[in-house]
Amino acid sequence: MSTSLQLDEQALRTIVEDVMRNLSRSPVLSPAPAPSAAAGPSSSGGAPRVSSKGPRYGVFEDVKEACAAAQDAFEQLREKGIAGRAKVVEIVKELCTAKAAEWGKFEFEETKMGRLEHKIEKLQIVRLVPGVEWLQPRGMSGDHGITMEEHTPFGVIGAILPVTHSVPTLSGNVINIVAAGNAVVFNPHPGGARSAALAVRAYNQAIHAALGIENLVCTIEQPSIESFDALAKNEFIRLLCITGGPAVVNAAMKSGKRAICAGPGNPPVLVDGTGCLKKAARDVIQGGGFDNNLLCIGEKQVFVLDPFADKFIEGLKAAGAVQLNASQLEKLTGVAFTTSKDAGGCSHAVLNRKLVGADASVLAQHAGTTVPANTPILFAEADADHAFVMEEQMMPMLPVVRVTNIEQGIEFARKSEHGYKHSAMIHSLNVDHMTLMARALDTTLFIKNGPCVAGLGLGGEGYLSYSIATTTGEGITTPETFTRTRRCVMVDNLRIY
């Protein structure tokens, strides 16, 4: 594989400027033009597929048309080999870096959730997602010949995006999926569909300019439940990659297609007092306050041993968090959750989606108080069964629960995590405590003495993934996740000795 694939910065700048001129003429902000009657999958790498009003660049109204175009692009990519895949990965990373501020602002204005600076940062760190270098063949040689195992693509992947991280998840998935040799069709969350289309158009224009491949990355312009159903049933879709809530995960698992599902998380934190409490407080705020706690890996509730709770709370305040009293917590809870009954008649809390990703200052107003605009997170002492403890609330409001001993802390953490096996954190210098919690919760990510983001290479060793497939068990997704392992065997021959 060639390592000399460098994207010319001036060419990239020209491509991006052209894309933005096109966008200003509304192909993202208004419905896409109707496809030309003559438009159809092309087997060549020629001019981009166009409708009567201009090129598609991967943005489609019709699922069937998008999937057919992606299948054609997959066949084109196969002809370009590993070097072609590497070029696409490079394009995505370069564009994410170059357009982080612009795309981050666009997504922030569309979704109205999270923090602008963190929207930008989530695009800047896409460069940490692994590409083609992750896929290594395995050779075996013995008395009866040689065997080679390689990672090969599925074809076209159908993918769902969350509204919380539309462009970052799309971009990270593109890197993993295309590095594995596949094409992809996205059905984004309607709340982030314009942001997804913005990135898809830019990627496809750059990919076509560099490689002659059209529609390698596709998205549905006006996504819906119906478009997802059509995507899941399409003949060209070989695999589904789902990053979203329980409803879409359940739908994917019932679709009849193999699905890689990144489901919900409710990551607990345990503080046992053996380490630095001030650092533990800073780490919890760094992770739980990032993008107003929209991260699925983010700290959602803290269990702290009672003898150390006061000092830990002092650490939270010193690091900029603001404490709510019991009355204020009650007011906020009344707005943040409603009560509903499930099929069995049992009552449970239902999250107020309007407050997801809201600033801490907005939550404070609902609690009947005011805080500085730059407050990273609110916190309040709560019982172990409180709604803010038991629900994945995705707000910058951290419940702190006092526990009597390490065993109770681990048990409360286990119950609050609900067996999702997603993420958990511990702040401790006691290896026995770390081991007990790791075994009890069995989470995909388990971070010791750091913020949640350290679990994905941001402050800790490792690499980045925007889809953590806990529901279906694959765990942290990489290019290998989107491949088939195929074996080629030569019997009794070709062995040198």
Image (tube, rainbow, N blue to C red):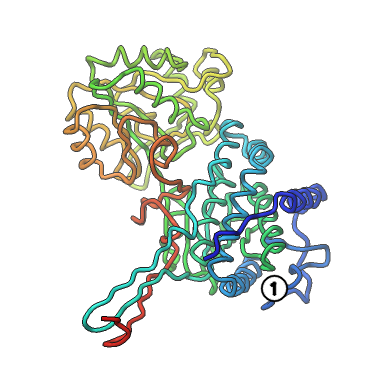
173, above or below 322, in the image: below
Q: For the residue marked with disc 1, what is the amino acid?
A: Gly
Locate residue 258 relative to residue 31 in the image: left or right: left
- At a point 39% along the width and 26% down the height, the residue shown is 284
Left or right of 282? Residue 73 is right
Residue 60: tell me if it is visible. no
Which residue sits furthest front? 497
Towards the viewer: 304 or 142: 142
Q: Quadrant of residue 64?
A: bottom right
Label 1 SS: loop
The quarter of the image holding the C terminus is bottom left
**Could you tell me which residue is drawn at 44 percent across and 34 percent down?**
393
Q: Quadrant of residue 340?
A: top left
Residue 1: give x, y in percent of width and height.
52, 66
Farthest residue to the bottom: give it: 492
How many numbered discs? 1
Residue 426 percent location from the top left of the image: 29, 31
Q: Which residue is under mark 1?
A: 45
Place of residue 165 in the rendered image (x, y in percent of width and height, measured from the top left):
55, 43
Q: Is residue 294 left or right of residue 475?
A: right
Name the one closer to the observer, 11 or 110: 11
Which residue is at 42% across, 51% downward?
Answer: 262
| Left or right relative to 440: residue 124 | right
Please tell me how crowded label 1 is: few (under 14), some (14-19), or many (20+) other residues with Cα within 10 Å: some
Q: Is residue 325 visible?
A: yes
Note whether 209 is above or below 13 in the view shown: below
> Is 277 in front, or is 141?
141
* Residue 478 screen position, x and y as percent: 43, 55
**Residue 416 or residue 343, whichever sits in front:** 416
